Image (cartoon, rainbow, N blue to C red):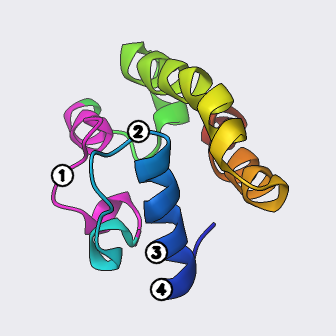
Amino acid sequence: MARTDEELQRASELWYQVGIYDTVLPVEDIKCHGCESRTGCTLGIKECHKQRGVKKCNLCPEFPCEIIDSMLQQIENNKKKWKEVCTDSEYALICKAFFEKEANLRK
């Protein structure tokens, strides 16, 4: 979980290398202050929360839904590419941040 500007910069570079984004994003564009702080969500999760009146995905009676399934499939599709471009330590961090997302969503 990147916290410093240096860690965020490296995360942005990795996301570019594995093809998540078509450019290295500025650090300010990828800082996460939680869903409530963002005006939008590229996956539509925040909007879905508002529409369904829930604060977290796992509180929704339709969880897991198409949005979550799509996000998890995207992560699964990227595993091989991430393994190719990351160092072992970077890959371990990505595993914590992304590959445990389903378990984290259920908390």
**Is residue 4 in view from this perspective?**
no
Q: Is residue 21 left or right of residue 91?
A: left
**Which secondary structure, mark 1?**
loop
The structure residue drawn at horizontal position 37% and vertical position 22%, both measured from the top left corner, is: 67
Marks 1 and 2 close (CB-CB < 8 Å)? no
The residue at which mark 2 appears reads as 19
Q: Which residues are magenta?
A: 32-51
Q: Amino acid at mark 3?
A: Gln
Q: CA distance from mark 1 to mark 4?
A: 22 Å
Q: Is residue 53 left or right of residue 74?
A: left
The residue at which mark 4 appears reads as 5
Which of labels 3 and 1 is toward the front? 3
**Which secondary structure, mark 3?**
helix
For the N terminus, the quadrant is bottom right
Which of labels 1 and 4 is toward the front? 4
Q: CA distance from mark 1 to mark 2?
A: 21 Å
